[in-house]
Amino acid sequence: MLLHLEKILTPDELRSARALLGPHAPWTAGRSSAGGQAAGRKNNDQLAQDSEPARQLQAIVLAAVQRDPLFFSAALPRKTFNPLFNRYSGTSNHYGAHIDNAVMHSRNPAQWVRTDLSCTLFLSEPNEYEGGELVIQLPQGERRIKAAAGDLVLYPGSTLHQVTPVTRGARLASFFWIESMVASSEQRQLLFEMDMALLKLRERGEDDPAVVQLTGTYHNLLRMWAQT
């Protein structure tokens, strides 16, 4: 499942985030945090994880996703890897095709996180840079994404993906991973589709025993499949 969530960040949050990623931000070489397979393919800059700008940015991003009901319905988050931040520009401008490590260690809080879902939160507008597309290989075919600043893309951590070279300007983004309460992508997809159908029924004012029964079925399936 690939889900594009628009305007996860408010305008004020987006302005704050971009200010923190300004010219004095403490950037480091991105490949220093990559796993063995990805290190040779990762050529970007990454915000120092232990810096004050990183801590402030992490709080902004986590607050945004925690209040979004669609994000919760799709991801059913159990653990969240502390958000990281990168920049693609100049000669540090691309990330070759790779698959994320299955398990990663988050610093804040310190915990191991299974990477069921990958998240990219765009912080630059598409017209501020050329190239820099997030390219994801899905069973249905290739998806090329260049979303508006403040939008988030949620996709399976098991997918082959890359960021194409940025040839003009700078691409700023946050990226992180979710360990879901429901490990199976198929089960998680079914739950999301059922939740969206129930939402539409409620919006139409459907208040009959069938809706109550289906809601119960959703929660019984979640109870059966979830790990908390």
Image (cartoon, rainbow, N blue to C red):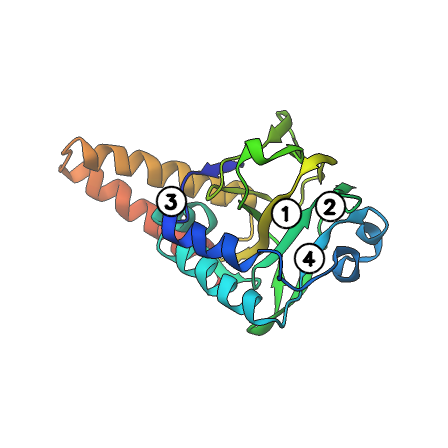
Viewer-side residue, 132 vs 66: 132
Judged from this view, the residue extending furthest toward the bottom is 110
Q: Which residue is mark 1?
A: 157
User: Picture quarter containing residue 53?
Assistant: bottom right
Viewer-side residue, 212 vs 109: 109
Crowdedness near tag 4: few (<14), some (14–19) or many (≥20) residues, C-alpha within 10 Å: many
The residue depicted at 57 percent of the width and 62 percent of the height is 81
User: Picture quarter containing residue 54?
Assistant: bottom right
**Residue 221 visible:** no
Q: Kindly report the distance in space between the C-alpha atoms of the residues bearing marks 4 and 3.
A: 28 Å
Q: Kindly report the distance in space between the C-alpha atoms of the residues bearing marks 3 and 1.
A: 18 Å
Crowdedness near tag 2: few (<14), some (14–19) or many (≥20) residues, C-alpha within 10 Å: some
Q: Kindly report the distance in space between the C-alpha atoms of the residues bearing marks 2 and 1.
A: 7 Å
User: Which mark sits nearer the N-terminus, 4 or 3?
Assistant: 4
**Residue 24 visible:** yes
Q: Kindly report the distance in space between the C-alpha atoms of the residues bearing marks 2 and 4.
A: 18 Å
Q: Are marks 2 and 3 in contact (CB under 8 Å)?
A: no
Q: Are marks 3 and 1 in contact (CB under 8 Å)?
A: no
Q: Which residue is mark 3?
A: 70
User: Which mark sits nearer the N-terminus, 3 or 1?
Assistant: 3
- The label shown at residue 46 is 4
Answer with left or right where residue 214 lies relative to residue 5: left
Q: Which amino acid lies under the numbered mark 4 shown in the image of this protein?
A: Gln
Viewer-side residue, 92 vs 98: 92
- Of labels 4 and 1, the one closer to you: 4
Q: Which amino acid lies under the numbered mark 3 shown in the image of this protein?
A: Leu
The residue depicted at 56 percent of the width and 71 percent of the height is 52
Q: Which amino acid lies under the numbered mark 1 shown in the image of this protein?
A: Gly
User: Which mark sits nearer the N-terminus, 2 or 1?
Assistant: 2
